[in-house]
Every structure is written in structure tokens, then in C-alpha cells.
Amino acid sequence: MMNHSDEAIALLTSLPRHQGLLESARTPISRLRLERRLQVLPEDVQRLIGEMEAVLHWGALAVETNNQRLVLRQQHLLEQLALPDDGYPGSRSLRALVAGVLDYRTLFAALAARENGQSQAPVGEWTCSRYRLQIERNWQEPHFHLERAFPWLPEVLQLMHQQQPWLVEKRLLQLCWQFTGRFHREGDYSLCAVMLYVLRWDMIDRWTRYNSSDARQRFQELCRLGRQTAMTSRGDAA
Amino acid sequence: MNELVIALGWAGVFAPVALGAIGSVIGCAIAGQAAIGAMLDTDSGYGRFIGLSVLPSSFVIYGIVLMFTLQQPVQAYNAGALAGIGILAGLTLMFTGIWQGRACATAIAAAKEKPEIFGMSIAPAAIVEGFGVFVFIFALVLAGAIPQTGALA
């Protein structure tokens, strides 16, 4: 199978380094230039990156009207990254990266849905996170019995109680930034490093274009979608 | 058996240059790609990037010198020594070239972001070079101890 690290070397050294998430006043490179640089990668890799962005991008949930479709996309992406002979160096790390970010997002979405008055856990395949069953079983528990694995859950829940969507989203971005930082290795020129760069670019982009009124609107939208999904899932299950 | 030992002896004579060339090729390719990428993102310092990217080419030169040092009629009495010195030295030169290329690529990526650390960023690559030089020098020293005739052996 083809080794993509050759393209990744020139690509990654051509990209400016990310500053810290909160320190960045703007993205280190424009979207147009980033996309132009990514064109050196083979088409299948570009497609994979696009798929990852579609699944993990911060705007993805806001525009996704059908959660089932999003779950299918998540499953498809994880299956692609789980293939033993997919030719992508470090795909095990890639899968761990994507799965980890999905876990964070799922926990935030579940907390938000419950805070918005959803009294019962969603039914059916509402996420690909490995914590789905535990969240469903412990829906009534404040932190789903996951506070040991995710010590930040009480803090985030408190922010939600205080109706601070801006701080909630800031915390989510910070946590995801820290999590993805674990996958960053100096001198790593693999596809995983490229995807990590793009993912972190998306986070900086989200942060630098942030504004609190948008955050409130998006938070309400997320809650509305959570309710809608739960109702749809229950209807399907019935 | 003798034929196999003699074949190994010839492999030992040519291994330093062949394996050293492989190391240099891969090392220079890795560092060269990094240099090209860095040039896309900067407006100056191109010469430094290119200069750094050719650093792993030294290993093929060491290999050539070793090959000429080891070059002699291969017989059963010296084939084992030629194979041992040549193949092990060649393998070391190959891996040193590859890893030096990676060290150079990282140095280029770092110097691109922070030009003032260019000198310091070369240090890891220089240390890797040092290990290659150790092997080269001691292979030369040992090559001088290879018996020249069967009688001496």
C-alpha cells in the first residue's frame, strides 16, 4: 500500500505552526491556502480529511438536522480508520484521536440535552461514542458516573447551570485542544499529523471567529436538536 | 562453503557504499522534502534549508572511502573480516543517514518558525553525524588489521 508520509513531510513543513488556542488572534494560515496545500495529498486522503472535518467540525452539529445521518458518518469514518490494511501510517492513532474527540463532544451534547430538560436518555444509535451505553444507563446521575474518567464534568455542568454558553464552549474547545495535544509529536510526518493539524486549525478557526451571541444561539440550537433527536429516536423505537 | 564465504567477502567490500548510498538517498529525500515545504512558507533563508537538506549525503562518501580501503583480492582467509567490517559499517551508515534526514527535516521545520535557532537546531543532526564518523574511523582502523595473506593468518 502507498505510504503517504512522503507527501506529509513537504506538506507539514509548508504549514505555519499553530500557536496556543486562546493565544491565537487568527488562524495561522487562511482556509484557501490550507486547502491549496492539502492538494498535494492523494485524493483518497483528501476525501478522508474532508470526512473527518465534516464529522468533527464545530459547525457540523449546528447544520445537521438529522442526527442519524451524522451517526452514520461517524461510523463510516471510524470504520475507515479501523481497517487493518488501510495504508495510512499511524491509523491506530488516528482512530484514537477521532474517537476521543467524539467522546468529548458526546458528553457535552448529553449534558446540554439533559440540562435542557430531557428527562430520559436518547434511544437508539444517537452517537458512536464508546460511552453511549454508560451515559444511557446513568442518565439521571449528574455526571453519568464518568467523573473519574473525565474530571472536568462537574465544572462544565456548573457552567451549564449558570447559563454560560460562551464559557461552556470555550471549555470544550480547551479540553479538545489539550486532548489532541497528546497526539502531537515533534518530527512526526504521518497522515495522523496532517489530520491533527487540520483538526486544530478548525478549533482555532472556531475560537477566533467566536462571539458570545452566536454561542448562545448555537447552544439553544444544539438543545433543540437534542430534543428533536430524542423524540425521533423514541418514535423509531416505538 | 568457501564460495559462500568469498561471496560474503565481496558483499562486505561493496556494502559500505551501497548501504551508505541508500541511507544518503533516503535521508536527503526526507530533508529535501522538508526544505521544499519550508520554502513555500518563508520568503528567505532558502539556501540554509537546502544546505541542511544535503547533510546526509556524507554517508555515501564515507562508504566510498571504506570500499576503497577494503578493496583487495577476496580469499577465504580475509572474506570473513571483509564481510563483518563492511556489512556492519554499511548498515550503520544507512541507518545514520536515514535518521539524520529526519533530524534535518525537524531542524528545517523549527528554523523556519524561529530563524534564530537555526544553529542550535542542527545539533541533533551533527551528533548523529558524529556516530557515523565513529563507525567510519574505526572501520578504517580495523580494515588495516585484515590479514593480507593466508600465511599471516
Image: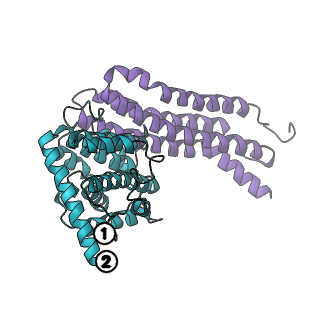
Tell me the distance, in whole angstroms, between the alpha carbons under discs 2 and 1: 17 Å
Q: Which mark is residue A236?
A: none
Which residue is most to the bottom? A238
Which residue is located at x 21 percent, y 56 percent?
Answer: A223
Which secondary structure lies at badge 1?
helix
Front-most of residues B2 and A172: A172
Label 1, on which residue?
A72
Q: Are marks 2 and 1 on the same chain?
A: yes
Residue type, label 2:
Ala
Point out the image quarter for the N terminus of chain A: bottom left
Point out the image quarter for the C terminus of chain A: bottom left
- Where's residue A178, x and y in %? 38, 39
Kindly identify which chain the residue marked by label 2 belongs to: A
Residue type, label 1:
Leu
Front-most of residues A137 and A56: A137
- Where's residue B70, x and y in %? 67, 38
| Residue A31 vertical position relative to residue A238 in the rendered view, above or below | above
For residue B140, side relative to residue A178 (left or right): right
For residue A149, side relative to residue A12 (left or right): right
Q: Colour of chain A?
A: cyan
Label 2, on which residue?
A237
Dot 2 or dot 1, earlier in sequence: 1
Q: Which chain is purple?
A: B
For residue A221, side relative to residue B3 (left or right): left
| Residue A77 vertical position relative to residue A112 in the rendered view, above or below | below
- Where's residue A115, x and y in %? 27, 52
**Residue A194 visible to an observer of this rendering:** yes
Tell me if mark 1 has few (under 14), some (14-19) or many (20+) residues whose alpha carbon lies within 10 angstroms of its own.
Answer: some
Which residue is located at x 40 percent, y 38 percent?
Answer: B31
| Residue A114 vertical position relative to residue A175 in the rendered view, above or below | below
Kindly identify which chain the residue marked by label 1 belongs to: A
- Where's residue B142, x and y in %? 73, 32
